[in-house]
Image (cartoon, rainbow, N blue to C red):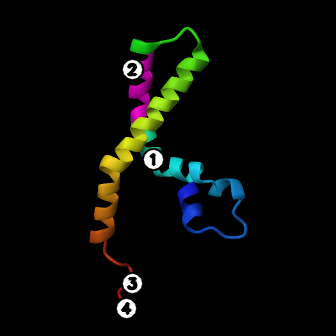
Amino acid sequence: LAIVIGRNPNKNTPSFLLLKPLLFTGKISYGLYVYHVLCFSIVFKYVAFSNLFLNFLVCFGLSYSMASASYYVYERRFILLKNKISVSKDLS
């Protein structure tokens, strides 16, 4: 939703949806979905702190970092490739 609104903002778009951190999170959301389980497993197995909030912050930071790296190293290449080979819907 944030990516769609970010690409087509209008006067009815709530301003908080246009914040750059939120738009960036929308870009890397697939990576967050894929890597969060791995990050939580790593943190709770090898780095677990006695403070649950600290565990959550470390998991969040690691997940966000891995998803960002995945986006720039891997996903963006396929997005650019898709844009190059996609067929235009406007055939007239």
Count residues near mark 2 (Cα–Cα under 10 Å), then give few for <14, some for 14-19, many for 20+: some
The answer to the question of whether label 1 and label 2 lie on touching residues, with beta carbons closer than 8 A, is no
Q: Please tell me which residue is depicted at 42% across the width and 43% down the height of the picture.
A: 68
State the SS at label 1: loop
Q: Position of residue 6 (x, y in %)?
A: 57, 62
The N terminus sits in image quarter: bottom right
Residue ID for mark 4: 92
Residue 1 visible within the image? no
Image disc number at residue 42 = 2
Q: Earlier in the sequence, mark 3 or mark 1?
A: 1
Q: Amino acid at mark 1?
A: Ile
Distance between mark 1 and mark 4 Cα atoms: 35 Å
The residue under label 2 is which amino acid type?
A: Ile
- Give the main secondary structure, helix, strand or loop, of the magenta stretch: helix
Q: Which mark is residue 90?
A: 3
The magenta stretch spans residue 75: no
Question: Residue placed at 67% from the left, 70% from the top?
Answer: 10
Q: Nearer the viewer, mark 2 or mark 4?
A: 2
